[in-house]
Image (cartoon, rainbow, N blue to C red):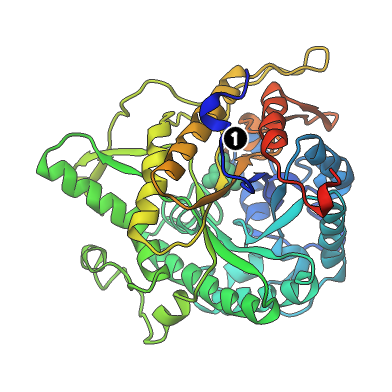
């Protein structure tokens, strides 16, 4: 598939990247002093992950990072978003620092810089050290202090070479999938715990932002959310009110305090005092520490209707206005991507926006003669890039885009059964094969890539 005209005119300097996360690719779970995380514990608990898959080996990136950086270069990436495993750096969550963990990321970052690829580091992509969960997890506000300590250690060591920092990935998922539905680690099932966790996570973000700012004055710091574009299933007043509640739950609960407005009063009233934690007078100031960009992960949109029986939100997810779905069962809806980016820029002082994840799982076939034909994924990317371009035209300050994912990996509760990569991974041999979508994406990045280092690439 050619790069269509609609995406051939991204602004000069637009950043093209790809993303991964530590637990999903690294493996080496027990090596070099790494401590146990909630995902180790969860994936080793029978019944939690499809096929009993774990991240023990994953893509073995911990040993194959040199190969992987070479592949990133082949994909013409201008930036690589990865996450740092807290339990490699501070194995017990607090206290002693593990030198080997710092060395691993130092080498990776040096290799990226040598390849002309800008490192974007996420400090937390869901892998809380298990000892911190044992001490109460994210609902315990002391976890935020531990996170700030960890951010301090990492940024002191790597801040000279990492200038793009993301505090948290998708706190909505950490809180609600981890503490309410129990689909993700640590697998608790209390709505109140989840709401307490959101506050702990936002505090952690604010505290870490302040630490990063002190340690790396020229850093650009942001948070990554998975905001949802919510549409009422019908135009009825009840469905529109339901959509507003869903927006409060998925979006405003995070965005309002991040941008200095405090928690939305309608949601505070809906959740009630038994669910909402104590909010200390300075908390909101901490959470609203100024950031430099907002990272947005987008896969699909929400279509909701009123359902008073469905507590606590009184919302039911209805059918999408399209039958097209990815292997995750997520509706393919590029219009929602445009609408979301425009809405965020309209309603909040986000500064520059970056799409920090976008992509699709499809049931790829193993390589045949070194080729993986995945036209559906390329089509998904092409249509979503066109939608992102449309958002820029409509005024959204979008400055970069990271594909999810660089390579097939451990897709959380789905284990290895869902492939999102631009690169196919044969888990038996660890052989990597760039898919057709990856070759296509290399063409996108190659065409618009703005050379650095005096244009040496
Ligand atoms: C996002 C996660 C990422 C990946 C994609 C498919 O919610 O941040 O790790 O699992 O979904």
Q: Front-most of 393 and 292?
A: 393
Q: Is residue 374 left or right of residue 457?
A: left
In this view, the residue farthest toward the left is 237
Q: Is residue 406 left or right of residue 287?
A: right
Q: Is mark 1 within 8 Å of ligand 1?
A: no
Q: Callout 1: helix, strand or loop?
A: helix
Residue 140, placed above or below residue 411: below
Q: Front-most of 204 and 211?
A: 211
Residue 66, placed above or below residue 372: below
> In which quadrant of the rendered image does the N terminus lie?
top right
In this view, the residue farthest toward the bottom is 281
Q: Residue at x 76, y 35 (%)?
A: 75
Residue 48 visible, this orientation = no
- The picture places residue 329, in percent across and down from the top left corner, at 46, 28
Residue 300, placed above or below residue 162: above
- The picture places residue 224, in percent across and down from the top left corner, at 53, 57
Mark 1 crowd level (few <14, some 14–19, many ≥20, 10 Å Cα): some
Q: Residue at x 66, y 79 (%)?
A: 149
Q: Is residue 210 left or right of residue 407?
A: left
Q: Quadrant of ligand 1?
A: top right
Q: Front-most of 138 and 299?
A: 299
């Amino acid at each position: 598939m050619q790069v269509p005209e609609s995406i051939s005119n991204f602004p000069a300097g637009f950043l093209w990247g790809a993303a991964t996360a530590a637990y999903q690719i690294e493996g080496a779970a027990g090596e070099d002093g790494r401590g146990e995380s909630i995902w180790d514990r969860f994936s080793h608990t029978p019944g939690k992950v499809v096929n009993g898959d774990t991240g023990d080996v994953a893509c073995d990136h911990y040993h194959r990072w040199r190969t992987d950086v070479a592949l990133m270069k082949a994909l013409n990436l201008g930036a690589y978003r990865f996450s740092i495993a807290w339990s490699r750096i501070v194995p017990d969550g607090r206290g002693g620092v593990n030198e080997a963990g710092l060395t691993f990321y130092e080498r990776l970052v040096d290799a990226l810089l040598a390849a002309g690829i800008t490192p974007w580091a996420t400090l937390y992509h869901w892998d809380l050290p298990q000892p911190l969960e044992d001490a109460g997890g994210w609902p315990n506000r002391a976890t935020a202090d531990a996170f700030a300590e960890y951010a301090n250690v990492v940024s002191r060591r790597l801040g000279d070479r990492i200038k793009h920092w993301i505090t948290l990935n998708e706190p909505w998922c950490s809180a609600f999938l981890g503490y309410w539905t129990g689909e993700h680690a640590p697998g608790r099932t209390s709505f109140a715990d989840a709401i307490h966790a959101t506050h702990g996570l936002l505090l952690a973000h604010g505290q870490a932002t302040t630490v990063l700012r002190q340690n790396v004055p020229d850093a650009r710091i942001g948070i990554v959310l998975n905001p949802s574009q919510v549409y009422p299933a019908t135009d009825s007043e009840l469905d529109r009110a339901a959509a507003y509640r869903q927006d409060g739950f998925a979006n405003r609960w995070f965005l309002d305090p991040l941008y200095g407005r405090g928690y939305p009063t309608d949601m505070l009233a809906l959740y009630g005092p038994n669910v909402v934690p104590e909010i200390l007078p300075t908390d909101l100031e901490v959470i609203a520490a100024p950031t430099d960009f907002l990272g947005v992960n987008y896969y699909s949109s929400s279509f909701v209707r009123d359902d008073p029986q469905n507590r606590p939100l009184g919302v039911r997810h209805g059918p999408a206005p399209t039958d097209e779905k990815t292997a995750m069962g997520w509706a393919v809806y590029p219009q929602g991507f445009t609408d979301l980016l425009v809405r965020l820029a309209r309603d909040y002082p986000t500064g520059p926006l970056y799409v920090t994840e976008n992509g699709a799982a499809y049931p790829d076939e193993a390589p045949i003669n070194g080729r993986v034909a995945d036209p559906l994924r390329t089509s998904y990317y092409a249509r979503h890039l066109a939608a992102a371009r449309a958002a820029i035209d409509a005024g959204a300050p979008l400055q970069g885009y990271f594909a999810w994912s660089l390579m097939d990996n451990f897709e959380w509760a789905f284990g290895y059964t869902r492939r999102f990569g631009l690169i196919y991974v044969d888990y038996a041999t660890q052989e990597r094969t760039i898919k057709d979508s990856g070759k296509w994406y290399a063409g996108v990045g190659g065409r618009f890539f703005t050379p650095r280092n005096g244009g040496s690439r």
